[in-house]
Amino acid sequence: MKIKKKNKPVLTGKKFSVFDFIYSIRVQIFITIFLVLLVPVLISNIFLLNITKKNYIEQKISKLQAQNTMLRNCILSENYMDNMDSALVKAELNRLANGYDGRIEIINNDFIIVTDTFALDENKTSISELVMRSMAGDSVSVYNEEGHFLEFAMPIVIVGNGNVEDNGKEVEDSKMVGALYMRYSTEDAESFNQDLFSMAMAIDVIVFVLAVLLAALISKYISIPFKNADKTLQEITAGDTGKTINISGYTEIRQIGEGINHLLDKLGEQEKSRQEFVSNVSHELKTPITSMKVLADSLIGQENVPEELYQEFLTDIGKEIDRENDIITDLLSLVRMDKEDADINIATSNINDIVELTLKRLRPIAALKNIEVVFESFRPVVAEVDEVKFTIVVSNLVENAIKYNVNDGWVRVSLNADHQYFYIKVQDSGIGIAEEDQDRIFDRFFRVDKARSRETGGTGLGLAITKRIVVMHKGVIKVHSAENEGTTFTVRVPLKYIDGEATNNKKNSDTKKNDTNLL
Ligand code: ADP
């Protein structure tokens, strides 16, 4: 068998589209693994970069605040606001401004900048909002992220000595003498952050490449069993029906493989029984036609055929036509009953009457072989059945009991019921059925002895029809037989017709060969 090299899914009969590619298990696994590897790294990088920067700035702020406070204390202790020639303050100002890359301004309480380490704005009026706020008594610090600098402003206050007036009130002797304004560059933090960012980017690129490689490898490995399964399915679809799927690997896909194998087995069985059925039907329908042809040919082939021979041969042809008709009628009724929505006309019926009427009709046939037919009814039984169909059940079973019986034999039919079911038993003293054939007698066209069945006008469909009807009534049929001793068929049917989920039961019991053992 030739297999196309490309693994295009032929089962759907569609072309392998971009959509199919994206939704293939391989691509989905690839994307998942890729994201699982990359996303956490990216998130943690962003998170770490932010945290690090924030910590760095916070530490810088608290460090500078301490330095600023020291400067302010120095200004106060040196009385710098009154006398601005303190070398200590100037040294401190330079140390801070140079050491921390900043600009420091000292503003007096008239908002005039009295000292500027950049010496640019001295004697000008400060219009900084921060200075205004610190003149009102607040110490403020602001981080300007875009401008890359930190701003501080704090009031310079000469604290009073806590004198108390005669009336007990504290004397308001603290005095606002000015404010300090500082602006420090945060470029060092930015460049530190830039370094960190470059490192994180390098890590991201490495993780990206690793994620792509790993995801490609793992997704390829994981999708191998699926590809194998797909390939085998394509082979099976292409006609290699004898093949079974052998998938090793994950439990789920193994189970899918087993499920498909099971399905294939079933389909194979169905196909086999379909073929068997078709060949049986053809054969059965052909037999009477062949006989008719032989009879007709022999008449045509002879000259001056006497009228009696015509009569005889035409009678035989008539019989063959009847037989053909019987087979077709039986087949049609089976086909009709096989349909999912087969008609069933349920009515409350007297089962005793059905049995008695059937026996009355069949007794003359039994009398031909001197067979005694006995009916034993344990109680009157009224049940919900399709009367016409159920008559066929009783009739087929009793007819068989007579057909496959010995001369001077007997047939016993009994009827009983409990609160849920009624039971019909048809017992005979006939030829019996060999153990190995008992399972198959309900199969279509199965006959233990073809010649005998044909002789007695059997089509081999009687028991198949019987079983189908019993199953339609949600009942079961069971056979018990011993060769040359006799046969007993037992039918169990619910007194009340069960509808609804019965369809499933119908199918189950129909397909189960051994369901007759339920009885
Ligand atoms: P048929 O039309 O041949 O009777 P059935 O489906 O009714 O077909 O029965 C199938 C076969 O089962 C019969 O050919 C016969 O060999 C066997 N069988 C059925 N009923 C009996 C019975 N009561 N005793 C012995 N054999 C039976």
Image (cartoon, grey):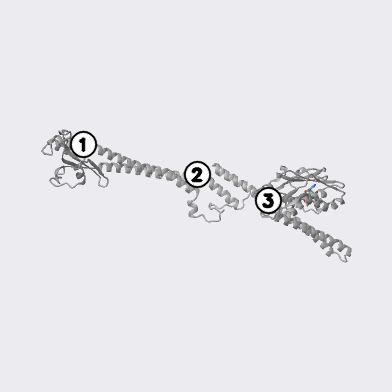
Determine if residue 444 is in view: no
Q: Position of residue 169 (x, y in %)?
A: 18, 35
Q: Is residue 204 left or right of residue 10?
A: left
Q: CA distance from mark 1 to mark 3?
A: 97 Å
Q: What residue is drawn where x is 73% and y is 56%?
A: 333
Q: Is residue 291 above or below residue 172?
A: below
Figure check: 104 above or below 316: above
Q: For residue 221, which numbered disc appears in the image?
A: 2
Question: At 32% from the left edge and 40% from the top edge, which residue is drawn?
Answer: 51
Q: Which amino acid type is shown beneath numbered disc 1? A: Gln
Q: Residue at x 49, y 46 (%)?
A: 220
Q: Which of the 4 quarters of the picture holds residue 138? A: top left
Q: Earlier in the sequence, mark 1 or mark 2?
A: 1
State the count of labels. 3
Q: Residue 459, located in which quarter of the rendered image?
A: bottom right
- Which tag, 3 or 2, sits closer to the chain's start? 2
Q: Select label 1 or label 3 by which is in front.
A: 1
Front residue of this view, candidates 203 and 328: 328
Pointer 3 residue: 272
Percent position of residue 468, x then y:
72, 51
Q: Quadrant of residue 171?
A: top left
Where disc 2 sits, the SS reads: helix
> Is label 1 or label 2 in front?
1
Gap between marks 1 and 2, in whole Å? 63 Å
Residue for badge 1: 67
Mark 2: few, some, or many residues within 10 Å (few <14, many ≥20)?
few
The three-letter amino acid code for the residue at tag 3 is Lys
Visible residue check, residue 257? yes
Query: Where does the image place residue 349, in percent across and percent down from the top left?
Result: 75, 51
Question: Is residue 176 shown left or right of residue 253?
Answer: left
- Element class at badge 1: helix
Q: Is 459 located above or below residue 305 in the figure? A: above
